[in-house]
Image: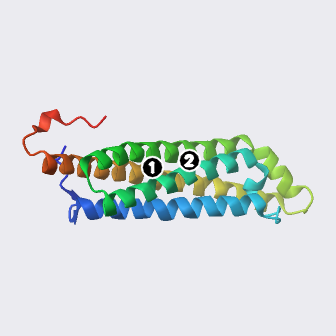
Amino acid sequence: MDEQLTKCCSCIPLKAGVVIASSLWLIYGIFQTVSNILYLISPNEGTNLYRYISVCTFSTIIFYGFITIGALFGLFVVAFSNTYKMMSIYSKIARGIVGFDIISHIVTIVVIVMYKSSILDKCVGPNDIDSDACNQTYTSALTLSIAVAVVSIPLSVYFSIIISAYAHKRKKKENPETDNDEFIDS
């Protein structure tokens, strides 16, 4: 694996790539956590599609909270404890972050699809908003959720690969006598 991936994005050293990936996960995690908390407590029911799906919102807050904590751990490891053992732990956490990201996007999309009629009923019901505007808002929310998933999931997988490659590099640096075939990041 190390022979294949020695730089992040073909031009950035792996350590800097780990810092960038962890920073992006941190920013993304904080943004998603805070925005979902705001969705949950928002009094503006007319424009907030997710307010009616509090289970999805709670799970999203928890998932992105874990992503934020994992990214903070990764930044701590790179800054203060840059050893193979710690990078190996972060590599496992990075795989968990990918899992949380995938699950969160799938849950969001599935819930939006499953609760379409409830969302549209709430939109049209008390506010007498045109049903076409409600349908357009629903379609936009679903499309945005899918688009974010299509961008976020491959990036998260790539970030995890970068972190694993850097952990491998740390192992080779700390134990130069180990053979490439002996690397098992489990």
Q: CA distance from mark 2 to mark 1?
A: 8 Å
The quadrant the C terminus occupies is top left
Identified at 18% across, 50% down, the residue is 169
The location of residue 153, given as percent across then percent down, is: 45, 49
Q: Which residue is mark 1?
A: 153
Residue reaching furthest to the front = 80
Residues 109 and 37: in front is: 37
- In the rendered image, is residue 159 in sight? yes
The location of residue 71, given as percent across then percent down, is: 44, 56
Task: Name the image quarter holding residue 128.
Answer: bottom right
- In the rendered image, is residue 9 in sight? no
Task: Name the image quarter holding residue 130.
Answer: bottom right
Q: Name the residue type under label 2.
A: His
Identified at 19% across, 37% down, the residue is 183
Q: Which residue is mark 2?
A: 105
Identified at 85% across, 53% down, the residue is 122
Please tell me how crowded label 1 is: few (under 14), some (14-19), or many (20+) other residues with Cα within 10 Å: some
Q: Name the residue type under label 1.
A: Ile
Circle 1: element type: helix
Q: Which mark is residue 93?
A: none
The location of residue 108, given as percent across then percent down, is: 63, 47
Identified at 75% across, 48% down, the residue is 53
The location of residue 137, given as percent across then percent down, is: 71, 60
Q: Relative to 14, say whether 63 is above or below.
A: above
Residues 136 and 67: in front is: 67
Whether the residues at callouts 2 and 1 have beta carbons within 8 Å, the answer is yes
Residues 160 and 127: in front is: 160
Q: Is residue 143 left or right of residue 161?
A: right
Q: Is residue 133 left or right of residue 185?
A: right
